[in-house]
Image: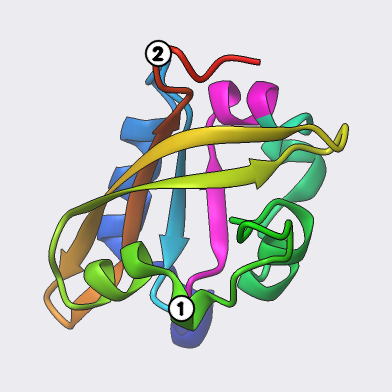
């Protein structure tokens, strides 16, 4: 495999961890593209990762959100959590997302940056429906 297409070891190890969790979780690369999400996330979102593969951040935002109060996608550069993760800090936010069936959900989202020898490699992001926010 050519050097430019190899994934950082830290992202490979993070993917292995997330694949064994019952909590919906996804993995982003340093550009914000979704490079993996686990079975629980696929069930929640309405599509398994095997059916979507890597999803560029711009497509993800349009398909799922997060959404502002008017239901419009929030650009990635305006996501407080994305900004926190890129500064190598863990963070937590509450967002509205839309699943593939068009239903809006209030979710709690926590993220942890993945740091490698070259610095920020991406993030592990965990999400769930807070108690009392179920539809």
Residue at point 18% right, 78% down?
87
Q: Is residue 94 magenta?
A: no
* C-alpha distance separating marks 2 and 1: 26 Å
Q: Callout 1: helix, strand or loop?
A: helix
Q: Quadrant of the C terminus?
A: top right
Residues rendered magenta in the picture? 32-44
Relative to 120, 126 lies left or right = right
Contact? badges 2 and 1 (CB < 8 Å) = no
Q: Residue furthest right?
A: 101
**Circle 2 residues within 10 Å: few <14, some 14–19, many ≥20:** few
* Picture coordinates of residue 31, whole percent (x, y): 47, 79
Using the image as rendered, state which of residue 113 and residue 13 is in the foreground: 113
Using the image as rendered, state which of residue 93 and residue 64 is in the foreground: 93
- In the rendered view, tell whether residue 123 sits above or below residue 88: above
| Residue where numbered disc 2 is placed | 131
* Picture coordinates of residue 10, whole percent (x, y): 25, 57
| Residue where numbered disc 1 is placed | 78
Mark number, residue 69: none
- In the rendered view, tell whether residue 36 sits above or below residue 8: above
Residue at point 13% right, 64% down?
89
């Amino acid at each position: 495999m050519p050097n430019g297409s190899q994934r950082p070891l830290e992202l490979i190890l993070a993917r292995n961890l997330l694949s064994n969790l019952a909590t919906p979780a996804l993995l982003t690369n340093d550009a914000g593209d979704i490079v993996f999400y686990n079975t629980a996330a696929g069930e929640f979102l309405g599509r398994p990762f095997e059916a979507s593969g890597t999803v560029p951040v711009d497509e993800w935002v349009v398909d799922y959100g997060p959404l502002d109060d008017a239901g419009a996608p929030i650009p990635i550069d305006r996501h407080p959590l994305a900004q926190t993760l890129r500064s190598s800090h863990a963070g937590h936010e509450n967002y509205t997302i839309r699943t593939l069936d068009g239903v809006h959900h209030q979710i709690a989202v926590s993220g942890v940056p993945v740091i490698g020898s070259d610095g920020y490699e991406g993030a592990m992001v965990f999400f769930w429906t807070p108690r009392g926010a179920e539809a």
